[in-house]
Amino acid sequence: MNFVEAPERQALREAVAELAGKYGHEYYRDKARSGGHTSELWDEAGRLGYLGVSVPEEYGGGGAGIGDLAAVCEEFCAAGTPMLLMVVSPAICATVIARFGTDEQKRRWLPGFADGSVRMSFAITEPDAGSNAHRITTTARRDGGDWILNGRKVFISGVDEADAVLVVGRTEDARTGNLKPALYIVPTDTPGFEYRRIEMDLVSADNQFGLFLDDVRLPADALVGSEDAAIAQLFAGLNPERIMGASFSVGIARYALDKGVAYAKQRSVFGAPIGSHQGLAHPLAQVKIELELAKLMTQKAAALYDSGNDFGAGEAANMAKYAAAEAAIRAVDQAVQVHGGNGLASEYGLGTLLAAVRVGRIAPVSREMVLNFVAQHSLGLPKSY
């Protein structure tokens, strides 16, 4: 067992950090406040191959695992340039298509994921289903050789930037009459597909949308893989989503901690740097410990997933997502506290993160549902819902 990353991943981290540092948090903040997107950073990262590190080599990618893609995501966040679409497009959508897509789907989509020229959103959440994926009401029915898709989705990231959306719907099982999940690639210009921006109290370069699917007609090859493999396909995307979400939080926690430590060393009150006082030094040290623990669990989850252990990865990915979200919330809160009033001043780049890190407790799965998972599957306690 090795707790030190391979030299190749360390070199990848350094290269990504250098690129992200060239843009910096001011670039991200200005894009977010003006309603823009981090398109320049995304496109350059794609050209350099950083967005496609986990895409199979035969389709132009790096042929590495989710652990390397998570490292890329973490470094962007640690530099103050988080790109939420990384969690969705190359991690969920490209992974699902690479593992379960038809040969034609792989040839059509994976090269674009590899170089960043393709952006794809992922749509599972619905207004009335909440965390209960079994209550999804978006349905697909056959019409000759086509599919007809109807339903509604909510809080779907990056649709205005996306070429297509990977939509989770349900089809009727001909043998039982029960509905079962199925995944469809829906280009955003398909007739009957509409999206509306949800106004959020977040300063983010990634927007959230509600989707409306009204008799959306799709060709037969819009269905990803097999109808009967839908559950496996779904979890093939959800585990990487949790791993990437954890890396996202870890990266933001690193950014906040670095800002807090630097300020504690530089700011002098009562004749000494404020970092010399245990009232500030100890909370920062506690954040460092919690951050490193969350990072280790994230790396464990990625290693399990890349080894093909989907069930083991599910447990670790949930734990990593939980731990990283809590570490990020504490890191940002403490960094703001160290800065005092400056912590809420725009020039210090912390205030906008107060709401942003709170999202980690909610998405992609709530803290409460993670605890339900651990209680039931890790501890063997009775199911509570």
Image (cartoon, helix red, strand yellow):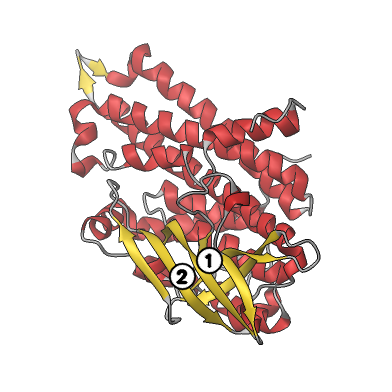
Q: Where's the N terminus, which quadrant?
A: top right
Look at the picture and state if 267 lies above or below 315.
Answer: above
Residue labelled with disc 1: 51
Mark 2 burial class by Cα count in 10 Å: few <14, some 14-19, many 20+: many
Residue at the image point whose x is 70% and y is 44% from the top: 314
Q: Nearer the viewer, residue 294 or 274?
A: 294
Residue 105 in view: yes
Closer-to-camera residue (157/258) = 157
The residue to which callout 2 is attached is 213
> Which of the numbered marks, if any, corresponds to residue 159?
none
Quick one: SS at disc 2?
Answer: strand
Q: Position of residue 372 (x, y in %)?
A: 63, 32
Indicate the amino acid at tag 2: Leu
Seen at 39% across and 60% down, the residue is 210
Q: Amino acid under label 1?
A: Leu
Is 46 situated left or right of 26 in this image?
right
Within-10-Å neighbours for mark 1: few <14, some 14–19, many 20+: many
The image position of residue 355, as x and y in percent, is: 33, 39
Direction from residue 2 to residue 9 in the image, left or right: left
